[in-house]
Image: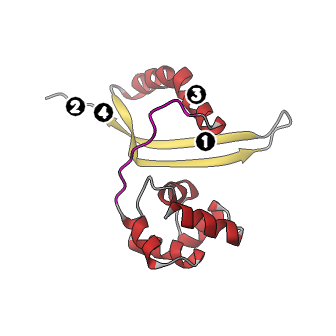
């Protein structure tokens, strides 16, 4: 599924943002589904396949609930490694500040959205990653 989607996007010269606009979903979520980490509702899966000229097998594969697993080794791709490094360096800080502002709990990755933007800067363009997750407090029983 993923290889077929990547090839069709390349053949059409279509960006993830353009595909997301055609499908009616956020670019980050649609991309994660096309890479196998989320599933799509039938109407969105059909739009992906139709937009890219792919068969029904791709649409059906996009609807399967994924097993969200990934390689547990330190990533070697430079972009992914930098995100890994950020969590390594700032993870405890983020956790402390979340607890200070919200109490004992976690940020949901289910009731969640993420946006990636480009910010022009004279010192060099900036990558802006915004994450928005519902706070889920731990409960006592």
Q: Quick one: label 2 or label 3, which is nearer the N terminus?
A: 3
Q: Quadrant of the C terminus?
A: top left
On the image, the x and y values in percent for residue 50 come to: 54, 79
Q: Are marks 4 and 2 in contact (CB under 8 Å)?
A: yes
Does the magenta-highlighted stretch encompass residue 68?
yes
Count up the numbered dots.
Answer: 4
- Residue at x-position 18% and y-position 28%: 140
Q: From mark 4 to mark 2, how far is it between C-alphas?
A: 6 Å
> Does 18 appear above or below 29?
below
Q: Which mark is residue 86?
A: 3
- Residue 139 on image: x %, y %: 22, 31
Q: In 3D space, how far apart are the residues under numbered discs 3 and 1 (Cα atoms)?
A: 12 Å
**Residue on which the image places disc 1:** 129
Mark 2 closeness class: few <14, some 14–19, many ≥20 residues within 10 Å: few
Magenta stretch: helix, strand or loop mostly: loop
Q: Is residue 94 within the magenta segment? A: no
Residue topped by disc 4: 137
Which residue ends up furthest to the right in the rendered image? 122
Secondary structure state at the residue bearing disc 3:
helix
Q: Is residue 109 above or below residue 38?
A: above
In front: label 3 or label 1: 3
Q: Are marks 2 and 1 in contact (CB under 8 Å)?
A: no
């Amino acid at each position: 599924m993923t290889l077929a989607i990547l090839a069709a996007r390349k053949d059409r010269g279509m960006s993830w943002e353009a595909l997301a606009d055609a499908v009616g979903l956020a670019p980050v979520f649609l991309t994660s589904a096309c890479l196998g980490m989320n599933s799509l509702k039938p109407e969105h899966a059909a739009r992906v396949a139709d937009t890219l000229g792919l068969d029904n097998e791709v649409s059906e594969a996009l609807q399967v609930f994924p097993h969200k697993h990934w390689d547990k080794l330190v990533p070697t791709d430079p972009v992914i490694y930098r995100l890994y490094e950020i969590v390594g360096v700032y993870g405890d800080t983020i956790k402390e500040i979340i607890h200070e502002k919200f109490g004992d709990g976690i940020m949901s990755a289910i009731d969640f959205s993420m946006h990636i933007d480009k910010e022009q800067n004279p010192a060099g363009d900036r990558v802006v990653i915004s994450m928005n997750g519902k706070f889920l407090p731990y409960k006592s029983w």
